[in-house]
Image (cartoon, rainbow, N blue to C red):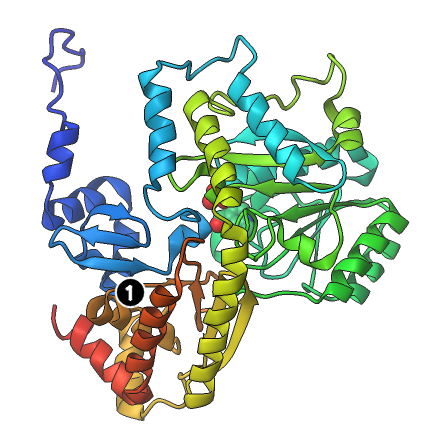
């Protein structure tokens, strides 16, 4: 070992993009193990997701390295709103590049960032007019919490959040994300108060008991909790209560917004308008990272509206960069030109109808169908106690996470045997989360429901046995 750095050392042996495209499944697995997240591979292995290498993606499908088409009902947790590589999005990006438009433009104003902000203000109801652009849902939610706190002042900085909430994993929003796994042992802001989701009396009690509460943050449809909604009466009462107590309501629409629920914002179903909201995921046109916090004008002006305060929370380096803004502008236009919000409503209704018919057919296996538009959860019965003893033992050996959760087995079989990809939920392991792109057609829904029907027709014991044969015994 030398203790000086060799200044003449040659260039490191780097992989090129062409090299990356040529990596095979084994090589990708090895690099993931060595440099990305070895622990996560464990879960991919349990689901058989580590056996697939995606070559490209188009519309409703991934296409793997063997040319197999996989129907995407996962939708990147809502981020593939427009389907993969939508031709208009690709065209807008290519044109932007061919014209050598400016990308990083921090010294000057940007026509793209201002046009995107204008569009979002035009879409958002009421006086939700001021926009902060970022790159992730967490960043938009950080911006939401900060603007609310800045506007309310230190005396009203306590934040109420809901049980089973998910608002992101950066350190600030983690304080209002209710997942023990994610919170781990981090030291988080403690000016928070947790209430059950959908319980207006708990909210009233909290507001009345603590005058330092000035902020309420809620997902309009809880995704990580297992697609959980509250009724219109709750949201109307939330709005009233916040007005009564001078609390600012932040609606997290990162997952359920952008038309997924059958309205642009899910809160529009309930005829109420929050004080601050946040979008991300599909806002990037399913092609890039884009996020937005949208606040009421008076709140914005109070928080950052004069030169002294304007730079307190100005965008980060990549907030509102050129091509991402152009992509989002095109995405918003596609959403309306192609009537994708109406499609989410129509196809979502059909999906739920077909799933309800499956529930009637398999009442022992499917417990409940929840959701609206194309944000749908299928909750399965907990099998931890009903499984035959021999299988119970085998299942418990497989993994703590999948124990009692038949949806891991169903998801693995859907992918391996029926070429369909579905997602799961963070806090409720018995729920399969369905968030297909908003371009989904009836035939895709039929393909998905028929595939699920085939798997469920095997009965719980058959599903578990098939899963074990697929994953555990084929190693
Ligand atoms: C409701 C909600 N809020 C915030 C986030 C965080 O978004 P991101 O992963 O882009 O940081 C997510 C991500 O899943 C989400 O579902």
* Residue 364 in sight in this render: no
Q: Nearer the viewer, residue 324 or 189?
A: 324
Q: Is residue 259 left or right of residue 190?
A: left
Residue on which the image places disc 1: 420
Q: Position of residue 326 (x, y in %)?
A: 46, 27
Q: Which quadrant of the structure image shows residue 94?
A: top left
Q: Nearer the viewer, residue 51 or 322?
A: 322
The residue sitting at 16% across, 58% down in the picture is: 68
Label 1 residue near ligand 1, CB within 8 Å: no
Q: Is residue 361 left or right of residue 270?
A: left
Q: Nearer the viewer, residue 458 or 443?
A: 443
Q: The C terminus is located in which quarter?
A: bottom left
The residue sitting at 66% across, 38% down in the picture is: 145
Q: Position of residue 456 (x, y in %)?
A: 33, 83
> Circle 1 — which element?
strand
Q: Which quadrant of the structure image shows residue 305?
A: top right
């Amino acid at each position: 070992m030398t203790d000086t750095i060799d200044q003449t050392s040659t260039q490191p042996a780097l992989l090129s993009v062409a090299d990356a495209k040529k990596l095979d499944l084994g090589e990708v697995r090895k690099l993931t193990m060595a440099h990305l997240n070895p622990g996560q591979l464990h879960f991919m292995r349990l689901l058989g997701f580590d056996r697939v290498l995606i070559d490209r993606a188009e519309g409703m499908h991934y296409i793997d390295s063997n040319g197999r088409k996989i129907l995407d009902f996962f939708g990147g947790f809502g981020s593939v709103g427009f389907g993969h590589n939508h031709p208009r999005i690709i065209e807008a990006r290519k044109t932007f590049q061919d014209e050598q438009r400016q990308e990083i433009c921090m010294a000057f104003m940007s026509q793209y960032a201002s046009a995107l902000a204008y569009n979002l203000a035009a879409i958002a109801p009421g006086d939700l007019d001021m926009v902060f652009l970022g790159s992730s849902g967490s960043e938009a939610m950080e911006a939401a919490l900060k603007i609310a706190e800045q506007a309310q002042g230190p005396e009203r900085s306590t934040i109420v959040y809901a049980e089973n909430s998910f608002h992101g994993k950066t350190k600030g929003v983690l304080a209002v994300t209710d997942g023990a796994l994610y919170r781990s042992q981090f030291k988080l802001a403690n000016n928070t108060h947790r209430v059950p989701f959908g319980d207006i009396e708990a909210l009233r009690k909290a507001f009345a008991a603590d005058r330092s509460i000035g902020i309420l943050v809620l997902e309009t449809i809880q995704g990580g909790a297992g697609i959980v909604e509250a009724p219109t009466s709750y949201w109307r009462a939330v709005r009233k209560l916040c007005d009564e107590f001078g609390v600012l309501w932040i609606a997290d629409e990162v997952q359920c917004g952008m038309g997924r629920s059958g309205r642009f914002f899910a809160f529009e179903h309930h005829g109420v308008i929050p004080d601050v909201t946040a979008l991300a995921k599909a806002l990037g046109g399913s092609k890039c990272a884009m996020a937005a916090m949208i606040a009421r004008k008076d709140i914005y002006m109070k928080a950052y509206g004069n030169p002294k305060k304007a730079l307190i929370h100005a965008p980060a380096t990549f907030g509102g960069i050129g091509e991402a803004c152009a992509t989002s502008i095109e995405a918003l236009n596609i959403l309306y030109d192609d009537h994708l919000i109406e499609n989410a409503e129509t196809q979502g209704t059909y999906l739920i109808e077909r799933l309800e018919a499956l529930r009637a057919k398999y009442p022992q296996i499917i417990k409940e169908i929840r959701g609206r538009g194309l944000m749908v959860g299928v909750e399965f019965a907990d099998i931890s106690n009903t499984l035959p003893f021999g299988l119970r033992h085998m299942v418990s050996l497989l993994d703590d996470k999948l124990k009692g959760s038949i949806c891991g087995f169903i998801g693995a079989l859907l992918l391996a045997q029926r070429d369909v990809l579905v997602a799961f939920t963070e806090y409720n392991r018995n729920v399969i989360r369905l968030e297909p792109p908003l371009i989904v057609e009836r035939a895709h829904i039929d393909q998905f429901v028929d595939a699920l029907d085939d798997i469920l027709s095997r009965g719980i014991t058959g599903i578990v046995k098939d899963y074990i044969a697929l994953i555990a015994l084929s190693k």
